[in-house]
Image (cartoon, grey):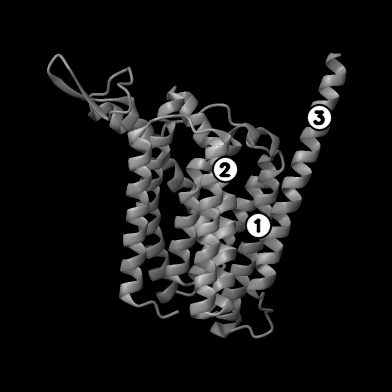
Amino acid sequence: MNIPTWVWIATMVGLAALLLFDLAVVGRRPHEPSIRESTLWVVFYVGLAVVFGLGIFAASGPKYAGEFFAGWVTEYSLSVDNLFVFVLIMANFAVPRIYQQKVLLVGIVIALIMRGAFIAAGAALIEKFVWVFYFFGLFLVFTAIKLAKGGETDDDEFKENVLIRWTRKVLPVTKEYHGADLTTRIKGKKMFTPMLVVMIAIGTTDLIFALDSIPAIFGLTKEPYLVFTANVFALMGLRQLYFLIGGLLDRLIYLSIGLSVVLGFIGVKLVMEALAENNLPFINGGEKISWVPHIPIWLSLLIILGTLVVTTVLSLAKSSRDRKRDLRAAS
């Protein structure tokens, strides 16, 4: 894809305007969104992503549109896994429900900035070194195996990372929240509130998830513009999705297995592409391996969607059976 500079600028301006509008809405009236409100916002962001993908189709054809949709669906599904940790963070910091929207929004903005840096670095590496695909592919396969062995997401506590501990140590932080404010004054001294620490926790924790999601999307498209926009649309609807399916997360018992299949598939695909473009002297004498099959993007999208649908259906069916069994046992 040959993306003109003005398209990048227009995309950034549109993203900034959307974020400012979102922040203004949340800041004007802090509240816990209803199921109806959350559903409408999720539908809005999903619809926006679909319209954007159709725009890619009209401007650049089905190949790049397919890459965008495959990348967006993958990033969105991996982002759902983030929600488990977000729930733990909110509980660990005892964030009042009416302020959780602002925390998530600012945390997502931090995550977008850091992911943008990751994407730029990844694109630069891929352009110069084809062998990076070997590293990305093997890393995803390793992550997939680890995720499959772990089964369900059953962590019951959140462990603060180095940056959060450093923030607590260096900055004067109050023990109590002061509304949604990041700073306050106590006896004339300016202090930060736990709200700042929570936002840092959300943003930096997402960076850990980006360690597998960014290599995963590079396995579906090598276009930085598509990688970036797919991540943007995946993260933009995450805040409303948190409130919409927060109560259903414990029912997605096979989510980790489904995500491990997706990551494993993309990891194998990356290794196959690396072999097809091989230039490492200790593999096939530094020559490309022509017999390695190419997996078309439509097949990748079909496998990803099929895996996620089957995983979701099986999860909900099993959790429904378990609830009925528990009710019978209780009666």
Choose mark 3 or mark 1, whichever is in front: 3
Q: Position of residue 272 (x, y in %)?
A: 63, 73
The structure residue drawn at horizontal position 14% and vertical position 20%, both measured from the top left corner, is: 189
Q: Is residue 278 above or below residue 9?
A: below
Q: Is residue 156 left or right of residue 200?
A: right
Residue drawn at 57 percent across, 68 percent down: 220
Question: Residue 39 — which label?
Answer: 2
3D distance between C-alphas at marks 2 and 1: 26 Å
Please tell me which of labels 3 and 2 falls first in the chain. Answer: 2
| Residue named by callout 1 | 262
The N terminus lies in quadrant: bottom left
Give the number of the mark in front: 2 or 1.
2
Which residue is disc 3 drawn over? 322
Residues under numbered marks 2 and 1 in contact, where contact means CB atoms less than 8 Å apart = no
Q: Quadrant of residue 140?
A: bottom right
> How many C-alpha atoms fall within 10 Å of the one at disc 2: few (<14), some, or many (≥20)?
some
**Amino acid carrying mark 1 in the image:** Val
Q: Position of residue 227 (x, y in %)?
A: 47, 64
